[in-house]
Amino acid sequence: VNGGRARPPDLFISHSWSQPFRDFVTTLKILAKERGLTAGDVIWICTFANNQFDLDLGKDLIRSPFFAALRNEQCGTMALFLDRSATSLSRSWCNFELAVVTDTERNRTYWQQLQRTTDGPSFEPPVLEQMPSSSNQSDKALMLCTAAGLVGTRRVTSGPVLDALRRLDCRDANSSDPADRRSILNYIVNRYLEEPAPDEARLVS
């Protein structure tokens, strides 16, 4: 596909393996249509980007392939895929990817506004095209995607997915490897909290 050479991603997809494959494909088709993706765009999907028979996640989080892909200058957007139960939010690695991409003033504003919005049909989060521009090249656009449409469009204005977004707490997320979960919690605490509360410090020790 890539002519025998590695190519940096234009778009990073964060998803949970437990999401029904049919929903994953539907969400991908919607995203491709909304963003005008073509066969020339490089999309990072863990299932295909990492060798599942010889998995190498690096010595630590910042040496992981996920971090490298998200921090690559070519990668301008992360799309978080959410099923009906927002399962991705319950996975530690998805929380890590979300923490990496929202660790900018631009995307923090977007995420915080999503969490503060009231329930009901009046839900109107800011669309990415209207978000304030930034001179920081490390800023990535964040898209929240479902099989019904993109969050923030008329097709997704309320429901359990948005409720799950508002209740997001990385301490509730899990990983198949407890060591990965501890490392991810430590990363989030160190990046987002200058003085972690005692309970949080004990949680990740």
Image (cartoon, grey):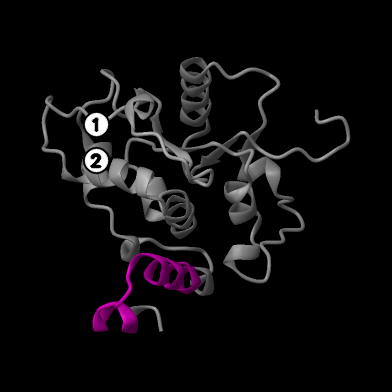
The quadrant of the image that shows the N terminus is top right
Residue 71 visible, this angle: yes
Residue under numbered circle 1? 125
Query: Measured along the vertical axis of the image, is residue 113 above or below residue 57?
Result: above
Residues packed near mark 1 inside 10 Å, few (<14), some (14 to 19) or many (20 plus) = some
Query: Measured along the vertical axis of the image, is residue 164 above or below residue 24?
Result: below
- Residue at 60% across / 53% down in the picture? 66
The location of residue 125, given as percent across then percent down, is 24, 31
Residue 196: say if magenta.
yes
Spatial separation of the CA atoms under disc 1 and disc 2: 6 Å
Kindly identify the amino acid type of the residue bearing the numbered disc 1. Pro
Q: Residue 162, located in which quarter of the rendered image?
A: top left
Write the start and end of the magenta stretch as one range. Answer: 181-202
Residue under numbered circle 2? 114
| Helix, strand or loop at mark 2 | helix
Q: Main secondary structure of the magenta part?
A: helix
Residue 188: say if magenta.
yes
